Amino acid sequence: MPFTSVPGAQIYWKQEGPERAPALVLLNSIGTDMDLWEPMMPALRERFSVLRIDARGHGPSSITPGDLSLADLAGDVLAVADAAGIARFSLAGVSLGGMVGMELALAVPQRLEKLALVCTSATMDAAMWGARVETVRSKGEGGGMAAIAEPSLGRFFSEGVRKDNPGLCDGVLRQLLTMDPEGYAGCGAAIRDMDLADRIGAITCPTLVVTGRQDTSTPLEGHGEHLLAHIPGAAHVAVDAAHLPPLEAPEALTTALVPFLES
């Protein structure tokens, strides 16, 4: 398994698809790993050289206890891209992955071809995320990953998916319950402390904002609309899903992403 060493962690990654195809980096949401994109991989690996990366403390990627920043996570992506021999790439990120993508587009615009922001935001509630980080780090009763797993599942998936596809939901729930609390807390701190809202007007690469019609965490109202209003020339597509379209609506998300990335 390929790992790249960065200060304080080992980052797990996987590269698939034709070597000479356009490079596409896929980033996961907080609480999930690169398997989030698995339903879309048959279509994506035919067209792109796909690089999937597990954020610190997610999947096999390790973590050192402590708060992280979006700059830390963006640096991890660059370190892995360098290790994989990728100079320029397009990026699609869900939730936290989209936030890291925006940080990259601002910090190293020369590396980004196109940016797809899936169910993400530049304007999250810092107080709510601060409380969540404290809860996950708490060792007592009512703390740890068990305290936030079930509520997270309710935001991740629509009611219909929770009813009709319990196996999918149970798999994500197990992932939440067994992940390193420091992985969630460290990345949660990056969301808590992000300062993207007033900076994203400087993003210059072509950008697609994808919102979920049933997403209660980062809906169009107040979240997607902020991205569309501030990122120059950003386009918008809505899909019928909650917060994790790669799992809930992979065909619809593929249909939205591929023409944007290939245009």
Image: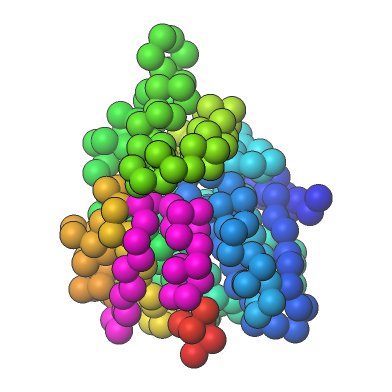
Across and down, in percent, residue 99 comes to 41, 58
Residue that extends furthest to the top in the rendered view of this protein: 141
Vertical comparison of 217 with 40: above or below: above
Farthest residue, direction right: 1
- The x, y position of residue 252, in whole percent, is 44, 68
Q: Is residue 228 left or right of residue 30?
A: left
Q: Nearer the viewer, residue 139 or 160?
A: 160
Q: Nearer the viewer, residue 139 or 174?
A: 174
User: Seen in the image, is 108 located left or right of residue 21?
Assistant: left
**Residue 176 can be seen in this image:** no
Which region is colored magenta? 232-257
Q: Is residue 254 above or below residue 94?
A: below
* Residue 164 drawn above or below residue 240: above
Point 39% across, 77% down: residue: 207
Q: Is residue 174 above or below residue 61?
A: above
Which residue extends farthest bottom?
Answer: 263
Q: Position of residue 12 (x, y in %)?
A: 70, 50
Q: Can I make out residue 259 in this image?
A: yes
Is residue 250 in the magenta section? yes
Residue drawn 50% across and 62% down? 250
Lateral position of residue 237 relative to residue 186, left or right: left
